[in-house]
């Protein structure tokens, strides 16, 4: 973790002439963008997989008719079809999973009072008036909702709410478009339930931003916004 702390500090030093006291926050945004660039090829691969699954829908519909009275055989047949066509129903999850180590490293870094036996100097860095190691509860206790720190969180909440609403509308449209084959294209147990709650998942970010250190919240806001833009290009909706 000491090496990661030095990386953040070095990035902050490079950005300090442009962002001054918020240089460490800018470094986190830059770090997040770098992580997302690294996993972008996997996101593109996941999009290709989604298009491949869409092309398989007529064949899956035939399997559904053939095995209408035997759900277990239907599930097995769909899995075999995906395997034969080298299509993974879980490929879209991989980009998110690969981001978790970077997120947890950042979360731990700004939740620790010491690094390598020394005081964690990164906790003194701020995003405007809000310390990167603080949480929303700290901002509420120091000036309230409309205090200097509270306004930073309100801005983040506004961004997250806008992105969540955008994702909600897109996901609802995508789920509706795939509804006719939803029952036949779910070889993974429980995937149907996940599909139903997917439109609401983005709003969970609002709660996360409120309870985690501001640095980790900034990572999440940046990554969530990136995802919304990325998916808009990779998964265009038919209008």
Image: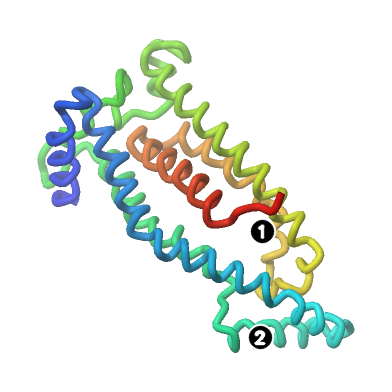
Dot 2 alpha-carbon crowd within 10 angstroms: few under 14, some 14 to 19, many 20 or more: some
Q: Nearer the viewer, mark 1 or mark 2?
A: 2
Mark 2, secondary structure of its residue: helix
84 up-or-down from 184: above or below: below
In the displayed structure, 215 sits above or below 126; it is: below
**Residue displayed at 57% across by 43% down:** 202
Left or right, 47 with reference to 171: left
Q: Point out residue 173 in the picture as x, y percentages from the top left corner.
A: 72, 50
Q: Residue at x 72, y 55 (%)?
A: 175
As drawn, the label of residue 194 is 1
* Viewer-proximal residue among 95 and 207: 95
Q: Nearer the viewer, residue 137 or 31?
A: 31
Q: For residue 109, which quarter of the picture?
A: top left
Task: Compare marks 1 and 2 and give the one earlier in the sequence.
Answer: 2
Counting from the top left corner in percent of width and height, residue 210 is at 47, 31
Q: Quadrant of the rendered structure where residue 58 is?
A: bottom right
Q: Residue 156 in the image: state x and y as whole percent.
A: 45, 28
Give the residue displayed 59% in from the left and 84% down from the top. Answer: 85
Pointer 2 residue: 81
The disc placed on residue 172 is none
């Amino acid at each position: 973790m000491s090496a990661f702390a030095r990386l953040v500090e070095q990035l902050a030093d490079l950005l300090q002439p442009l962002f001054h006291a918020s240089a460490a926050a800018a470094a986190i945004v830059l770090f997040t963008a770098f992580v997302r660039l690294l996993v972008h090829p996997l996101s593109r691969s996941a999009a290709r997989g989604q298009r491949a699954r869409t092309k398989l829908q007529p064949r899956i519909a035939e399997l559904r008719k053939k095995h209408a009275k035997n759900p277990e055989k239907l599930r097995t047949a769909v899995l075999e079809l995906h395997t034969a066509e080298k299509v993974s129903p879980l490929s879209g999850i991989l980009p998110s999973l690969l981001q978790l180590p970077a997120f947890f490293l950042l979360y731990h870094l700004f939740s620790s009072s010491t690094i390598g036996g020394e005081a964690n100097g990164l906790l003194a860095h701020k995003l405007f008036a809000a310390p990167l190691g603080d949480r929303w509860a700290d901002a509420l206790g120091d000036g309230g909702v409309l205090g200097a720190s509270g306004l930073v969180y309100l801005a983040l909440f506004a961004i997250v709410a806008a992105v969540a609403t955008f994702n909600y509308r897109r996901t609802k449209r995508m789920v509706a478009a795939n509804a006719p084959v939803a029952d036949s294209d779910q070889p993974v147990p429980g995937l149907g339930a996940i599909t139903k709650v997917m439109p609401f998942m983005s709003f969970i970010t609002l709660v996360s931003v409120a309870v985690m250190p501001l640095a980790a919240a900034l990572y999440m806001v940046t990554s969530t916004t990136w995802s919304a833009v990325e998916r808009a290009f990779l998964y265009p909706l038919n209008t």
